[in-house]
Amino acid sequence: MPLGAGALAGTTYNIDRHFVASELGFSSVTKNSLDSVSDRDFIIELNFIISMISMHMSRLAEEVIIWSTSEFAFVSLDDSYSTGSSIMPQKKNPDIAELLRGKTGRIYGNLMGILTVMKGLPLAYNKDTQEDKEGIFDSIDTIKISLIIFKEMLVTMKINKDNMYKNIENGFINATDVADYLAKEKLPFRDAHRIVGEIVVYCEMNKKSISELTLDEFKRFNPLFEENIKEAISIKNCVNNRRSFGGTSFESLKTQIVEARVFLERK
């Protein structure tokens, strides 16, 4: 509670600030009168927290934008959260994701605005600090509506699993798992790394994915390969074998989701 700090130096009246704070429901009182009237850390901190939330939403929005392009087509946004183009009739613009990404810049601006206001002020109250209100109110209003509409966009979004599975085979995503296979067969990892690099070059020259190689082709590069290499580098196993805490295995993700829900319910 700042009451009792006066304009900057406290008050000559004999008041019990702790008693007043208790009566008004405050947990404690400010400990320095100069700091009481000049401090805007709570505004800056709230601006930062909102900025960080907005940053994370912007990153997710960026992925939605990329995934919704015809090149990827991993997701399809509901018509309620996208619009057509004013000139190209075939287009479906991810408007909400783009707007959320754009609003992050404005929220960042509010944070930088109050930081810039405060950076040159001497202690005690200055009229400059009146600039703390407009930016924080704007950021609060913006993040509240952004969180609501972002959730609705995700809930109504369709996931195109077939396109995802089809694209998984591109880019040699399971190359690391081939190297891990050899390393688990006691081959030094740097040698396994080199061998897999040669395998990738071979696949590129022959227009194949690693999964399409036969056992004979694998053995050309190293005799340690056995029939179980196929199972070891299947995309499903590549994901599910990462069972370390926080990894991408199915069970690990289920645990993370449960823990996240428990965390949110406590807040």
Image: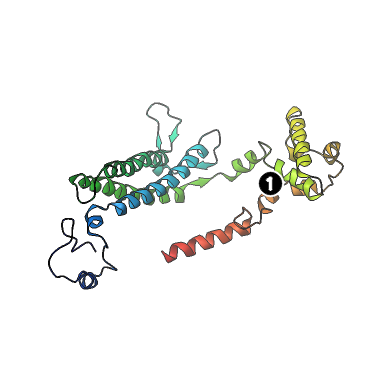
In this figure, what is the number of numbered marks?
A: 1
Q: Which residue is drawn at 19% across and 50% down?
A: 125
What x and y, as percent, mark residue 197? 74, 35
What x and y, as percent, mark residue 243? 66, 56
Where on the picture, by quarter, is residue 94? Answer: top left
Residue situated in front as seen by the camera: 150 or 21: 21
Q: Name the residue under label 1.
A: 235
Pick the quarter of the image with the N terminus. bottom left
Residue situated in front as seen by the camera: 82 or 139: 139
Pick the quarter of the image with the C terminus. bottom left
Q: Where 44 falls versus 175 (above or below)?
A: below
**What is the three-letter code of the residue carrying label 1?**
Ile
Q: Residues within 10 Å of mark 1 (few under 14, many from 20)?
A: some
Query: What colour scheme has been applied to the protein in the rendered image?
Result: rainbow
Q: Which residue is drawn at 35% across and 52% down?
A: 45
Q: Which residue ends up furthest to the left in the rendered image?
A: 13
Residue situated in front as seen by the camera: 108 or 62: 108
Q: Where 83 falls versus 241 (above or below)?
A: above
Q: Residue at x 19, y 61 (%)?
A: 5
What x and y, as percent, mark residue 221? 83, 37
Instruction: Determine the secondary structure under disc 1.
Output: helix
Q: Where 233 falls versus 194 (above or below)?
A: below
| Left or right of 164, for residue 205 | right
Q: Which residue ends up furthest to the top in the rendered image?
A: 87
What x and y, as percent, mark residue 199? 77, 35
| Left or right of 11, for residue 66 | right
| Left or right of 159, for residue 103 | left
Q: Which residue is drawn at 34% across and 52% down?
A: 46
